[in-house]
Structure formats: C-alpha cells, structure tokens
Image (cartoon, grey):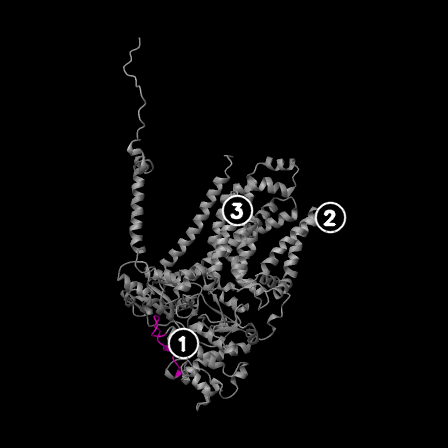
Amino acid sequence: MNKTVFVGVVALAGMSASVAAAGLVDEVKTRGKLNCGVATGVPGFAAPDANGEWQGFDVAVCRAVAAAVLDDPTAVEFVPTTGKTRFTALASGEIDMLARNTTWTFSRDVDLKFDFVGVNYYDGQGFLVRKDLGVSSAKELDGATICIQTGTTTELNLADFFRINNMSYEPVPIETNAEGQQQYLAGACDSYTTDASGLAATRATFEDAAEHVILPEIISKEPLGPLVRHGDNEWADVVRWTLNALIAAEELGVTSANVAELAAAPGNNPEINRLLGTEGTLGEMLGLPADWAVKAISVAGNYGEIFEKNIGETTPIGLARGLNAQWTSGGLLYAPPFR
Amino acid sequence: MVDIHFVRKSMIEEQEPPAATTGVAGWIRENLFSSPLNAVLSILSIGFIVYVLSALLPWAISPTWAATSLGECREILAGHEGACWGVIRERWLQLLFGFYPKELYWRVVLDFALLIVAVAPVLFTGLPRKMLYFSAIYPFLMPWLLWGGSVWNPIAAALGFVLGYFAHKLAKPALGGLAAVILAFVVPIIWWMVLSGPVVDALGSVLPLAMETVQSRNFGGFMLSITIGVVAIAISLPIGILLALGRQSNLFIVRSLSVGFIEFIRGVPLITLLFVASTLLNIFMPPGTDFDIILRVIIMVTLFASAYMAEVVRGGLAALPKGQYEAADALGLDFWMSQRLIIMPQALKISIPGIVSTFIGVFKDTTLVSIIGLLDPIGLSTSIRADQAWNGVVWELYGFIALMFFIFCFSMSRYSMFLERKLQTGHR
C-alpha cells in the first residue's frame, strides 16, 4: 500500500508524465490486465454473481477483448462505474474501455472526446403501464404522472416526446431503477419510462406481470455500445473489430461449438478463414496474434450466443432479438467485411 | 400514672412488600400506569407497537430461507405476503466481504478481531499495560493483513515514526525545541517518500516474506465500510486534536492554516470531496497512474472527519477553566507536557459524547461511497438486484444492511456511555 502512496505522491508532483507514451494495446499487454468499466448493476448487462464473478451482456464484450488481446478472458479488472463517474473514469485513463450500456450520442462522441466503436445493443425508450389504466398507446398519456430517472437521456427524450405531441405530464423524479420499480408498484406514478430492455427486465420481476404492459411506442433511439478515448486509434480498432468479430461470427455460422474445428484448418469459406486467421494477416494488422478472433469467440460464443445466454428469450429477462437481429434476418446488426 | 394498653415484646417478622409494588406487577404499575395520563399514553403506545409488530412479524417470519430466486420465494409463499430471505442466504458473505477472495476471509476476520484486542487496553485501564505495545503495532499490521504484499512495507512505514522520534530526541539538545519538532516531521516524510521504496524492494529481494496481495477493487460490503470507517476514525482523532490546538495557538501561521483547513473542509459536503477523490484527482494525475481509489477515499473521509473532530475537541478545550492552564504553567510544564498531563485528559473526557457521535456519523457516511461506484453494502444491494433472480428484492436487503449498521452504531454509543460513567470524576 505504501508503494501506492509513494507512486501517487510522485505522480501528483508531476514527475512521471510520460507513462502513457506507448499505445494502449502495448500498455494492456505489459500490464497483463484489461481495465474495463461496467455498470454497478444492470439486469442482464452487468452484475456480479454470488461468487463475485461479473456476468452479463456488456461484461461479455470486456471478456472477448481481454481474450483477443491477452489470451485470457479472466484477465479483466472490472471497474464498477455509476452514471456520474463513467465518463471521467474513461477520460482520466482509469479504465481502458467502457462497456456500460451507454447511448451513442453526438455530444458524447464529439464534445466529450470519446470513440464509440460500435453498437452492441439497439435499445429505445418505452413506457410501462398498468393494464387497468386502459391506455393502449403512449399518445394517450396526456396528463399522466411518469416516473423518470434523473440525469439520463431518457429524461430529455420524455420532454421532447410530450412537447412534439402537445401533451403535458407530471414527472416523478427517481434516482435508481430499484426506486423506479418501487414507486411504480406503489402507485406513485401511472407509468414508468426507461430503456425498453430495462422495462422488460423490470416487468419480469412483478408478481402479477400479466397486469402490466409495455406500450408499443418506442420514443427514442438508444444505440448502446462500448467506447474508448479519442486519440488512440490502434486501441479503438482492436475493440471495434473484436465486437465486429462476434457479430460477423454469428452471420457466418461460427459458434463456440465449432470455432475450434473451423480454426484448425482453412475451410472453403474465405471470409471465415480470414476471420479465424487461417488465411490472410488480419491479426497482424491489429498487432495481435492471427487467432485473436478465435479466442474472442471461444469465450462465450458469437453475438447470438451471448445474447441468448444473458438477455435472450430463454432467460428471465426474455428479450426478443428485434432490432438486434442480423441484417439478414431483418435486424440492424451489420458487421463490415473482414477483408 | 401511665395507662399502658399494649407493649410488643418481640420484633415482627419482616413482611413481603405488597404484591402490587414488587416484581413485574410493581414495575408495570410504577412505570406504565402511575397516573391516568401515563396509563392512557402507555395503552396507546402498546397498541401501536402491537400494530406494527403484527404487520411486521408475519412478513419477516417467512419460510423462504432456501429459495434461490424471487420467483421461487413467491412459489413457496403461494400468494401470501412474506419476505424473501433466500437473497440473504445466498449473498450475506458478499455483503460482508465484497469480492475478497473466499480462501482469504480469515485475514479480514483476524484483522477485525485483532482490532478489538488493540483497542481494549486503550479503553480499559484494568488490562495489562504491556498490551499497549500491541496497540502501537496494530496500525501497521492492519493494512498488511488486508492488502497483503511484502512484510517490509509495514515495517518501513513504522520505521518512519521511529526515525522521527530519534530525530526529535537527538536534535533537541543540539538545535533546540522548534528545530527538533520540525525535524521530527521532515525526517520521516523524506524517508517515506524517497528512501523507503528502494529499501523495501532491496529487503524484499534479499528476504521475500510476503502474503498474497489483494487488490483494493476486491474490497466491498461491510468490510469496506468498516475499513474506511475505522481508519478514518483512528487517524482523524490525533489530527483533530492537533488542529484544535493549532486553532488556539498564538502562532499566526499555524492558527490561520488550522482555521482555514477546518472552515474549508466543513464548508464542503462530504460527497463533493468524494467526487474530487474519484474523478478530479484522476484528471490532475498523468494517465496510467495507479493511485488506489480506496486510499483516495480514505484520505478524503479522514480529512473530513478531522475537521469535525477538531471542533469537538475545541469545545472540550474551551470548557476547561482557565485555572487549569495557569496551574500547568505554574508547575513549569512545557506546552506538550501540560497538554498531555493536564489539559487533554480533561478536555477529551468532556468531549467524549461529541467524539463518539462524530465517529458514528463518519461510519454511516461511508455509505456515500456507493455514489462513486465503490461497492459498499448499499452499492452491492444494487448489484445484487441486477441479478435477474433477485431483481425486485428491496426490503430484505435494506433491512439486513440496516440491522448490521444498527449493531455497529448501537455498540459504539453504548460504549461511549460506559466510558463516560467510568471517567466520571464528580465535577457535577
């Protein structure tokens, strides 16, 4: 501990300003650990289990990157961040990447100087109401009281939506999702609004889930994705193409079950060969071993497998693929070619 | 002539007091129904307590201990209202120890058990005085047990204090009092900042005595709260005393610095200081610097507690009659001796209730760290609810956390009352 104090004090004196001169890819490799910012707890996306192991859809992205760069999916230091601390944690270098269902917006990308490397979940804001309220569309919510998390994009979307439709509402500000659930169940608000994935997870916990409906309107675009700092494009490439590898693997039919077999020898699909490093030099271009994507996919499978395991229809959260299906099945997932 | 009607020749046997004034009946009559108003109030209060308990107990006594998810709890309860205690069974270790490695739990338990041993001789004068040596070693032992690492680290840290002591002792006859005090501060700081790092590395390479290191990131739950609380409490008392003395000092610079520090810290909410620790410091420091987040938080909480402690102690100092100071001067004691032998023992005794309530406040304030993403019990309750199996469980988790906090705070406050009685020397 004293050493840490020592390092900290020296750093405060500004004597070691050149620590980060090398690229982040090399820094992570020498450190042997990936510092990955996650949420302190979002159902299905990031949560520690009873053994303290982090699980979830966002966590899987961290593990895939760690596997690709360090060949070890457990070499991740998960840094729990809150909505308030996440951006400073990333900007200050405390974490190497942030995978904390963060919406890709103009100002976050441009003004806060981050690079969103892609989208791992297309979400949108919805409304949860009681069936006996007799409302079938969000446009009938004029004058309703609505529970809304403060300091999030959802708050702004809500104001926009009601202004566009010339309606009024009474906000009931809440701080956390748990508070929102309690307030809504206690009848403090007619409707609870947040990302539709969160609403589905919330509704699934209700004792009388059938008495509650999620209204069909999705009032905002919430593309959630991992992000890195501006200025280190090599590192951004690594994270971006690891995510793309997971998505492309599903499209190409590479799964955790057959990835080892497919990677053993070049097959007759050249794109799979390039992805898995049996042909071409894609890994080398990233500064990673040729089988980097094999390692990333071996951790928990391709995008579809990760989705099904953490938030898919077989889980208690039970989200349908919807927008998050491959482009070939009518969704928005579209990984650029591995060429 | 005296007309005597009756003379008792023998003493009457002692009689039992009337049944209505002894035992349970007597106590009830004395305390609950001594007057009509009292009786009415008693009946109303009892009715209220029964009402609350009749709602609470059926909820709390619920056969859901073995459940593995909220859904299973509901199946067991089959429509009845009831608590879902399965979450506590599954997660209580996590709520106590956070992510500390399971096989190393003994280190945390041992650490806090030793804390009691170390504190005991300070508070109970009846215990053998030699135990105080252990109390002196404990502050260096504690972080080593929690964080692990090389055994030379705590030894090097302790050596700084030893160096400071000798610097003071040797310099005093040669250079005079003020220079000795300054040296006593400067020498250890030079040792810690410049020399101890290489020396520890060298010793470690010669004789590598080390325990498995545990990263601060793995700290969580009550263990984190207690660590932050205990360290802040232990360090803030001496700093607070120094600040209180500094505030009363005649030296202009010392006084201004003390007043400035106290007023600045007290003028800022704790949560602001925590945000400074978690985000601002990161931005000031060069990227890639690893300055332990928990250490940053402990420093901030300690500074915060010290400022409040200083004012509590100043209250104690102000309450002492001036004659005590003059008597100390008349005896020819120097400043530190008069403080140590006459002023402080009395001033601190007066301040005990204030000191302990500051302690309790600091301990409870540690829950604020959940806002900057540290997983203290409150932060962990969010994480636990993010497990879909327990999503929606609220009261059970908060109830458990509240109970644990109550146990700690209540024992602290009982303790302070015990101390006050023990130190009562009859000035009132």
Q: Label 1, on which residue?
A: A306
Disc 2 versus disc 3: distance between alpha carbons? 36 Å
Q: In the figure, A85 relative to A104: above or below?
A: above
Front of the two marks 3 and 1: 3
Front of the two marks 1 and 2: 2
- Mark 1 residue crowding within 10 angstroms, few (<14) / some (14–19) / many (20+): many
The residue segment tinted magenta is A312-327
Disc 1 versus disc 2: distance between alpha carbons? 73 Å
Q: Quadrant of residue B69?
A: bottom left
The extreme top residue here reads B1
Which percent across, then down, holds residue B263?
A: 56, 50
Q: Secondary structure at mark 1?
A: helix
Q: Quadrant of residue B339?
A: top right
Q: Secondary structure at mark 2?
A: helix
Q: Label 2, on which residue?
A: B174
Q: Which amino acid, by three-letter code, is at mark 1? A: Ile
- Mark 3 residue crowding within 10 angstroms, few (<14) / some (14–19) / many (20+): some
